[in-house]
Image (cartoon, coloured by chain):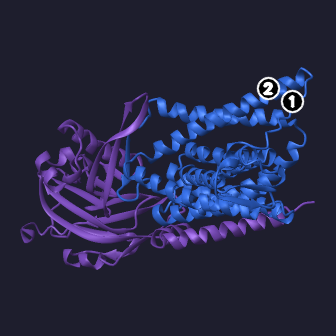
Amino acid sequence: MHVYLPIAEISVNIWLILAMGGGVGFLSGMFGVGGGFLLTPLLIFTGIPPIVAVATEANQIVASSLSGALAHFRRRAVDIKMGLVLLVGGVIGSFMGVALFNFLKSLGQVDLLITISYVLFLGIIGSLMLIESLRAIWLNKSGNAAPSRRPGSHNWIHKLPFKMRFRASHLYISAIPPLIIGMLVGILASIMGVGGGFIMVPAMIYLLKMPTNVVIGTSLFQIIFVTALVTILHSGQNQTVDVVLATTLLFGGVIGAQFGVRFSQKLRPELLRALLAGMVMLVCIKLGFDLVVEPDELYQLMPMGAEGH
Amino acid sequence: MKPIFKAALTCILLMLNINMAKAELVTDLSNRVIEINSTFTGANLLLFGTFTETFDYDPNIHDIVITVKGPNKPMILRKKIHAAGIWINYYQEHYMSVPSYYSVLSSRPLEDISDKPTLGRLGLGTNFLYFKPDSMKQRLPDLQAWQDFRNAVVRLKKEEALFVDHPNGVKFVGNGLFRANVDFPANVDVGNYEVSAYLFRDGKMIFEEHSPITMHKYGFSNQLSQFAHQYPWLHGILAVLFALFSGWLAAAIFKRK
């Protein structure tokens, strides 16, 4: 069954979109990641214009991160104050990201910006995860438990000014690092259509040294607002948010996530991480391959003023 | 001119049930509307026509060409080049106006009907469509590139079925009655279109008639798209509110523990 996407302006097979949403939702449930960094490239592979894929993904992440965050709110596993500082950075970053996005759009280079950002980030994250998980698997096999790294309690971050107290995280640190992390995530959200959890969560754990139990909830809290802002900015300036597509993806994603959560309990965590890393690398290679290999069509025709439709 | 040949070439838009038996009635079509549902694969329009009784139609010397042309839009065409190991957009041309839809139907291949100067002057056929470039923004290196770009516009539009050459699209069904079937894909633009009919005699255009039609889309997905383009900021806010509601609903449905 085909459905016409009003903003992407193409007909797509609704089952394919549901399956993609479901598949990535399954992975999200299994690994506890947002999945935007897999879904946006998959949409691009389907033929959805990259600028529509990015903006629509941001819209879908608003929904998926809220449904994820609600459970953490109920358990009060959210550092609201830290979330707000991250959010201030996120708002600044979103405006910067959308401005860069629109500038490159006017030059006709926005698809390149999106693809290169993905190749870069997926490549780095994927290979780090792959190395880490393979090492854990190898260590497990050889009988040694993986050394649980206990990061030092003080580093250069504690020497920065503008200190604030974050009670829920039991931290007294400068507001600058969370602002910068939030800003980076805002830029990524507006350029790549991702929540940015894959950057924020490790940064919160290793750089800010936040307690693990509030990390996910706080990052989801920030992601809801940042992706909401990015959705509004993209819709307002580029008219690229496709609600039909976002809703279809969400529907598949919600169901997929339920199965993913259950399935994950049957697999060893380091094996799961190795699998996810493998998928990330595959998507990265495919995107990079498309950049390097001569495309079938060298020309691209677009309406003036509203490129990408 | 017209009285000499008494050539009232007429189109009857059966779909709209309008009989344009006389040229003077052409304006009757001005407020006519084609409605297509954008969810479906497209629409088609059947054109019927005939000659007035006094016109002496001879298939060996007379030819008919019908064009349907959609709203003109400014467009940008970009071309990728291989640079630093990757393929990136480099050359570009801004066109002031490119018809978003153009189909030409004729009783014979156009080049058999008339000569190139005539076809070029009338802009008949995708080979003779002219797109005015924005002279302020020209960046193409040479005339060859300019020609390649123009041809690429036509090729890309043809691939989307938005430009169509139908060399045998006008069919005679007997007694001087002819018909032409025009297909519109689902992604046609809404707006004002012009249906033109040309009568050729020995390669010379002896009569032409133009009538406006309006393309209208209906259906949920079209309303959504119009809303998104007319009120983009409000659309963004509503998209977020809807996402928040969906997210809450999903959490409520699958609340476990």
The picture places residue B196, in percent across and down from the top left corner, at 24, 64
Gap between marks 1 and 2, in whole Å? 8 Å
Residue drawn 19% across the image and 37% down it: B142
Secondary element type, mark 1 = loop
Chain ID for label 1?
Answer: A
Tell whether label 2 touches label 1 (CB within 8 Å): yes
Q: Is B172 displayed left or right of A119 in the figure?
A: left
- Circle 2: residue type: Arg
- On screen, residue B26 versus residue B251, left or right, reads left
Chain letter for the part of the structure drawn in blue: A
Viewer-proximal residue, A219 or A172? A172
Q: Does residue A183 appear anywhere in the picture?
A: yes
Determine the chain carrying the residue at label 2.
A
Split into 4 quadrants, where in the image is the N terminus of chain B? bottom left
Which of marks 2 and 1 precedes in the sequence?
2
Snapshot quadrant of residue A38? top right
Dot 2: few (<14), some (14–19), or many (≥20) neighbours within 10 Å?
some
The tint of chain B in the picture is purple
Q: Is residue A1 visible?
A: no
Vertical placement of A140 versus B97: above or below? above
Q: Residues within 10 Å of mark 1 (few under 14, many from 20)?
A: few
**Residue identified by numbered label 1:** A146
